[in-house]
Image (spheres, helix red, strand yellow):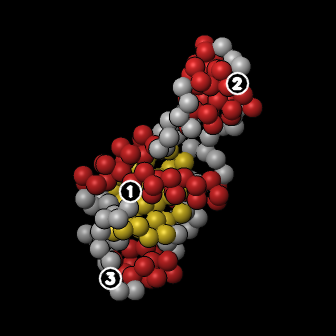
Amino acid sequence: MALLIIIEDEELLAESIQLAVGEALPHWHTKLYSTLGAVDLGLAKQDNICVLMEPGLRDVSREDSVRQVAEAFPDALIYVLSSRMFEGEEETYLRQGAKRFFNIVDADVFTLLRILAEEYEEKFGSPLPALGKREEQVYRLSIDGLSIREIAAQLKMAEQTVKNTRNRIHRKGYVTKPF
């Protein structure tokens, strides 16, 4: 299972991101921390970790925050999320180990999560079990927005079979609606 560690001292923003993850990536597990010092370093032993963090935390300087996270989680994908940017800061974060920088003012949370999910799969592979051929067909048509009736007609299946297939897909952790 994919793990997203969110390090953000603005509680409302952190909880909003966590809710969006629950909707867009229900097979991902999230952990929220308001300070870097509160992060459970035992999590670093796990594989397949993404960190989404605010660099200006209460307990560490903006300049050192990404470096400290990169040292604690050397194999993690680290993403910096900030509402303000200072000259040269993005390059500093990237040098310290961040994969990417997002300006929260300009970023759509669901677009951000789609990018995280794609880059996660590139590095670690899919956190979900594989779909069978028919499940894959139903899944693709579902995320394209087709109704059960339309999928059944296109794939020459009974509507109840499409419903059952979608239920199996959901149990495997996939979401059949687009972001």
Rendered residue at 35%/65% (across/down): 106
| Secondary structure under the numbered disc 2 in the rendered image | helix
Instruction: Give the image location of residue 176, x and y in percent.
Output: 54, 33
Marking on residue 108 = 1
In the image, residue 104 sits, relative to residue 158, either above or below, namely below
| Secondary structure under the numbered disc 3 in the rendered image | loop
Of 12 and 67, the residue lying toward us: 12
Instruction: Give the image location of residue 37, x and y in percent.
Output: 34, 64
Instruction: Give the image location of residue 46, x and y in percent.
Output: 56, 53
Rendered residue at 72%/28% (across/down): 134
Instruction: Give the image location of residue 30, x and y in percent.
Output: 43, 47
Mark sitting earlier along the chain (1/2): 1
Residues at discs 1 and 2 in contact (Cβ within 8 Å): no
Which residue is identified by label 2? 155
How far apart marks 1 and 3 lie (CA) works out to 21 Å
Q: Quadrant of residue 67?
A: bottom left
Q: Amino acid at mark 2?
A: Leu
In the image, residue 121 sits, relative to residue 74, either above or below, namely above
Viewer-nearest of discs 2 and 3:
2
Of 106 and 49, the residue lying toward us: 106
Which residue is identified by label 3? 86
How far apart marks 1 and 2 lie (CA) works out to 34 Å
Q: Amino acid at mark 1?
A: Asp
How far apart marks 2 and 3 lie (CA) works out to 53 Å
Mark sitting earlier along the chain (2/3): 3
Viewer-nearest of discs 1 and 3:
1
Q: Residue furthest right?
A: 133
In the image, residue 91 sits, relative to residue 130, either above or below, namely below
Q: Mark 3, residues whose alpha carbon is within 10 Å: few (<14), some, or many (≥20)?
A: few
